[in-house]
Image (cartoon, rainbow, N blue to C red):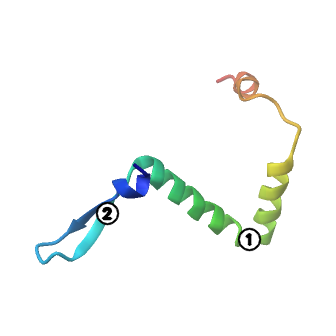
Amino acid sequence: MSELEDVQYVSDDRGEVKGVVVPIDLWNEITSELETTYLFQSETMKKRLLEAKHRQDGIPFEEALEKLGI
């Protein structure tokens, strides 16, 4: 079953849909896409995000945590 099939509609006593309940994975995907869309509205942020996406240098996550003392 797909996540869209798991969406539940909430309606009032007249049968009018007033809300939905969605699986958390689908909600996270939706909010992530909304945030990306918002950030891409700024040309500066769009450039930074695309540069970061293609960046090849960096350090492993665990090493970053260690350097931060976390």
Mark 1 element type: loop
Residue at horizontal 37 percent and vertical 56 percent from the top: 5
Packing grade of label 1 (10 A; few <14, some 14-19, many >=20) is few
Crowding at dot 2, Cα within 10 Å, few <14 / some 14-19 / many 20+, comes out as few
Q: Is residue 54 above or below residue 69?
A: below
For the C terminus, give its image quadrant. Answer: top right
Left or right: residue 5 versus residue 35 is left
What is the three-letter code of the residue carrying label 2? Val
Task: Give residue 51's mark.
Answer: none
Front residue (pair 53, 62): 53
The mark lying in front, picked from 1 and 2, is: 2
Q: Name the side, left or right, on which 54 lies relative to 68.
A: right
Looking at the image, tell me whether mark 1 or mark 2 is earlier in sequence order: 2
Q: Amino acid at mark 1?
A: Ser
Taking the spot 39% from the left edge, 49% from the top edge, the residue there is 1
The residue where tag 1 is placed is: 42
Say which residue label 2 marks.
20
Q: Position of residue 18 (x, y in %)?
A: 26, 72
Residue located at (41% from left, 58% from top)? 4
Mark 1 to mark 2 CA distance (whole Å): 31 Å
- Which residue occupies 77% across, 64% down? 46
User: For numbered disc 2, what is the local secondary structure?
Assistant: strand
Figure check: 1 above or below 64: below
